[in-house]
Amino acid sequence: MIDFSYTENQLMVRDMAREVATRVIVPTISEFDRAQKMNPDLLPAMRKANLLGFCIPEAYGGLGMDYISLGLASEELEYGDTAARVILSVHIGLYSLPLLTWGNEEQKQKYLVPAAKGEKLGTFGLTEPAAGSDVVGLQTTAVRDGDHYILNGEKMWISLADVADYFLIFAWTDLEKKKNRDHTGISAFLVEREMAGVSTASIHGKLGVRAGNTGSISMMDVKVPKENLVYKEGYGFKIAMFCLDQGRYTVAAGSCGLIKACRDACTKYMFERQTFGTKIANYQLVKQMLANMEAGYESSTLLWLKAGWKKNRGERNTRETSMAKWVACREAEAAAANAVQVFGAYGFSDEYPVERFYRNAKGASIYEGTREVHTLMQADYVLGLREDKELERDLPVVEG
């Protein structure tokens, strides 16, 4: 049976995220976007609203909410600005949920509980200056030395790099397999900002998501206790792919928030702006652009809901999540382009928010798997050239 109604808990999370977006993000976003700085009030507001760990089980400091709740919160935060949704994507999708699934009990108590409570912030370190979609192209190494691993390398385009406390870092532990580009030589580690040899730097001059922190992580002879190895040596690639399933899901849902923001801004403006003696809401081609936004929003929402439904049941969802991310990001980019067109010359100015929507939308077609990667994935599924096997770790099953 298909039921499109939301539970009280899901609506509660949606409303918490909406309140933060309305009160904290929207009134100040133009200022911080222009300044290319993160709003210092945003993280405390998200922490106070329990948004930094709401879909982590109560036993580990969260509220025990489900994946549909995560999608709804992502949509509401991105309606305010993409930078706010990115915090959920990274801290929950790429750090906390993978640690919940792949971490041992000691790691969960030390590194997940503080994150779920909002006391510490986590992020994800996979991308490097010369390794993005080509994951096995990464150069970071982790060499075993007694009770420690010695990490050396640099990560690039890392969201929250300068504000996170914990980093989930991926590195080669088998250098022979590195030579052969065998991904079973990659492992995952929990690294703390305070460890000697760790340094970060911010990246400025980005096209979009300017109100969010993006940067690099450098590691020079960083001694990481062997207890910080996540799961087992050689499982880094599988863990990274699991992480991306969670992150892509939040990007898909968040893109629906951006589409909705475009739609709402255009709806208001279409009744305000007059040309040739009539409101532009009366022009058929302008209506067509608005209708396309609505169609993109509804279709993309159904796709992320399907992926979330599978996640709630603990089922493998790589195919569904990829489709949701691919389509939603495509529709968000189209909606933002149309929004600028509706506003005309004013859409080319930061006097109105649609130019920011346009800049932000572009990033989502690149991060968490480029649109080209997802295009090929979906074609390979149809052709029977790709098949998802069950993971060796059970996905958490949640009730909602």
Image (cartoon, rainbow, N blue to C red):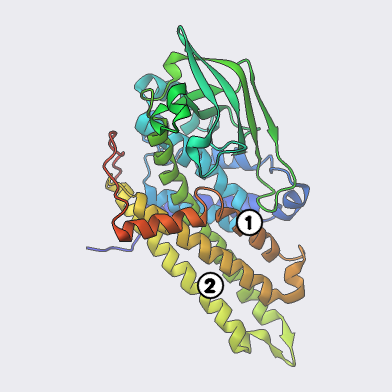
Residue 92 shown left or right of residue 321 in the figure:
right
- What secondary structure is found at the residue carrying circle 2? helix
Between residues 45 and 265, which one lies in front from this camera angle? Answer: 265
**Image quadrant where residue 157 sits:** top right
Q: Which residue is mark 2?
A: 293
Measuring 33% from the left and 56% from the top, which residue is drawn there?
A: 381
| Mark toward the start of the polypeptide (2 vs 1) | 2
Measuring 70% from the left and 80% from the top, which residue is drawn there?
A: 272
Q: Which residue is mark 1?
A: 360
Residue 159 visible? The answer is no
Measuring 32% from the left and 61% from the top, which residue is drawn there?
A: 382
Between residues 131 and 32, which one lies in front from this camera angle? Answer: 131
Residue found at the very far left of the displayed protein = 1
The amino acid type of the residue labelled 1 equals Asn
Image coordinates for residue 30, horizontal then vertical, percent: 73, 55
Q: Which mark is residue 222?
A: none
- What secondary structure is found at the residue carrying circle 1? helix
